[in-house]
Image: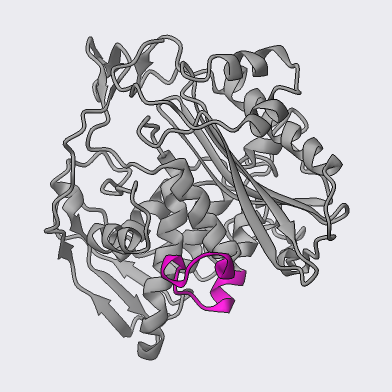
Amino acid sequence: MSYTNIINAQPKSDAILYSILHSNKNTSYKDVLNHAKTYRCQIIYTQINRDKNNLPKFINYYFNYDPQVYFNPASTVKMPLAFLSLQKLKPLASKGVKRNTPLQIDSSSEWQKAAYKDPTSANGFPSIEHYIKKAFLVSDNEAYNRMYQFVGPQNINRDLLDKGYKDVRITRQFMGLTTEQNRHTNQVRFINEDGTAVYTQPPAYNTDSFDFSRDIKLGKSYLDKNDSLVNKPFDFTVHNNLSLDDLQQMLQSVLFPESVPRKQRFNISQEDQRFLLQYLSQFPSETNYPKYDTSKYYDTYVKFFFRDSSHKMPENIRVFNKVGWAYGFMTDVSYIADFTNNVEFMLSATLYVNSDEILNDNKYEYESIGYPFFYNLGQTMYQFELRRKRAFKANLSDFKITYEQRDKKDTRPSISDVDN
């Protein structure tokens, strides 16, 4: 594969992580590591060491990390949008708005789509809470679009930049809109279930400018919206952008807020933090609303580091994470907790699997290269963590969640077709 956007800077790699990664001799896995530049593979392993008071210390180790090498963040952008949505809701509590307050999303242009009902929720209405559930459980795209419309691109980018996330640009919904159309956001109305108004957020237009000066073009050709082949690289210049390090720090800041500077934290309540912990780690099989078809949306569906042919997670492990996949890019940002062995660590990785260099043809090596690589990577680091000596045993009780249980008497049809 060849690319027009590989920067000639030296990527950051740590010898200790390099050694751990190469302890796995799986052939296809080693091939990716040995051709990391070709696969645009970047990895961050975050070691967590507790002191005698159970306070964690974090050390990041990098493999082939370079924030200037573009990867499409795809659905990983749903994670900061969920955090920012709860942050925006917090001051609205004084107006009677909560995360489960029903909402109505209006349309004021031909490209905008209204949302007044949601048959997948318990009360039939949309809500920020329900959108966050759908975004984490199966990576639902509409959920992202609605959070984008609620928070707004101006607030999204200003806030993340103020928090110190320098490599962030979130300016696109997943609706095929133009750059100009994405500057407009819908009116959002919070209501009581009887339809009476609680709070109205008017439609908005983002006047901020964005830096699109760096050309980001990949591949040799692509299929356009009419499925016609265009013989030139696909242009990602105005697409969303996030560095792997920023994604790792965002997740750490919510899971371990005391471990980062106050400026970097998301201003959410402890109750909202527990809600996030639950749905970052809960399985579709444990969830009643939405009721997903578990033969398709199985327990490891969005847990790439444990996704093998069994489709089952070890009972002693929970993964608090967000994945994304699109255009041949695959990304997972995770915190992994083993409650039997008191093992914890963070692991973040991104990969590009598109050997024919044609974008938008849906012919990517997710199954043959991507998922096996992520699984082998996850198991390599997990086995290392099981062997690693620690001065103090970790108490992981803060991450033990009482999860839902699927109602076996529920005869509603399961959801098997999600736009994600």
Colour style of the rendered protein structure: one colour
Quick one: 113 or 8, which is closer to the camera? Answer: 8
Q: Is residue 29 visible?
A: yes
| Residue 400 versus residue 32 in the image, above or below | below
- Outermost residue to the right: 340
- Per the rendered image, the range of residues in magenta is 257-274
Q: Main secondary structure of the magenta part?
A: helix
Image quarter of residue 410: bottom right
Q: In the rendered image of this protein, does residue 312 appear above or below residue 96? A: above
Q: Is residue 346 left or right of residue 26?
A: left
Identity of the residue drawn at 38% across and 34% down: 72
Residue 319, magenta (yes or no): no
Q: Residue at x 45, y 79 (%)?
A: 98
Q: In this orientation, which residue lies closer to the viewer: 66 or 267?
A: 66
* Quarter of the image where the N terminus is located: top left
The image position of residue 311, as x and y in percent, is 73, 36
Q: Quadrant of residue 393?
A: bottom right
Magenta-span inclusion, residue 259? yes
324, 187: nearer the viewer: 324
Up-down: is 101 above or below 396?
A: below
What count of labels does the image hold? 0
Image spot of residue 418 (x, y percent): 49, 43
Quadrant assignment, res 67: top left
Camera-nearest residue between 418 and 157:
157
* Percent position of residue 377, x then y: 67, 30
Q: Position of residue 413 (x, y in %)?
A: 61, 50
At 35% from the left edge and 59% from the top edge, which residue is drawn?
A: 160
